[in-house]
């Protein structure tokens, strides 16, 4: 029984993305994507997240407490975002020239919202 988390403890998942009628769609499974896109092209994006230990989780929770008009409150949006930024290790996203896109906060912030929200959903499921 493993009770401690190491740096090498990862969780992997994929999303399936493509455009239809000029709009980006994201699916959790290959079968959902095949059914929706039919013969239209879509891509698989692989992700790897590091498993967060108690100390890292606690720090993320602390960052998510905000002062609003003198009242301290837990901001779930900040929590999810900080957890994603802290846990995502890699993805298979390529730019227009076929080069790997670095995993960093700036690139996550530039994403299409539908993709960013789907990645947040993956993170929610895995954590």
Image (cartoon, rainbow, N blue to C red):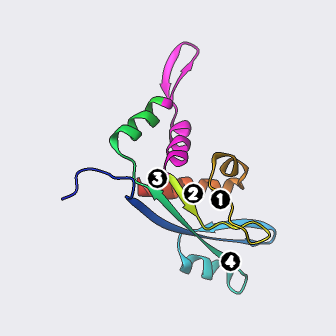
Mark 2 is surrounded, within 10 Å at the Cα level, by few (under 14), some (14 to 19) or many (20 or more) other residues, namely: many
Residue 6 is situated, as x and y percent measured from the top left of the image, at: 34, 53
Separation of marks 4 and 3 at Cα, in angstroms: 24 Å
Range of residues picked out in magenta: 63-87
Residue 32 is situated, as x and y percent measured from the top left of the image, at: 57, 76
Q: Is residue 70 magenta?
A: yes
Q: Tell me the element at label 4.
A: loop
Q: Is residue 109 magenta?
A: no
- Which is more toward the observer, 73 or 111? 111
Residue at left offset 69%, top offset 53%: 113
Mark 4 is surrounded, within 10 Å at the Cα level, by few (under 14), some (14 to 19) or many (20 or more) other residues, namely: many
Residue at left offset 66%, top offset 51%: 108
Residue 124 - label: 3
Separation of marks 3 and 1 at Cα, in angstroms: 14 Å
User: Between disc 3 and disc 2, whose residue precedes?
Assistant: 2
Residue topped by disc 2: 119
**117 relative position to 59: left or right:** right
Q: Are marks 2 and 1 in contact (CB under 8 Å)?
A: yes
Residue topped by disc 1: 115
User: Between disc 2 and disc 4, whose residue precedes?
Assistant: 4
Separation of marks 1 and 4 at Cα, in angstroms: 13 Å
């Amino acid at each position: 029984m493993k009770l401690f988390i190491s740096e090498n403890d990862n969780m992997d998942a994929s999303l399936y993305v493509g455009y239809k009628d000029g709009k980006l769609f994201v699916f959790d499974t290959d079968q959902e994507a095949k059914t929706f896109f039919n013969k239209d092209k879509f891509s698989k994006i692989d992700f790897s997240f590091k498993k967060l230990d108690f100390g890292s989780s606690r720090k993320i929770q602390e960052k998510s407490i905000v002062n609003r008009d003198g009242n301290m409150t837990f901001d779930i949006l900040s929590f999810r975002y900080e957890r994603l930024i802290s846990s995502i290790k890699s993805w298979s996203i390529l730019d227009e020239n076929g080069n790997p896109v670095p995993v960093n906060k700036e690139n996550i912030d530039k994403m299409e919202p539908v993709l960013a929200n789907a990645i947040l959903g993956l993170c929610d499921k895995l954590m």
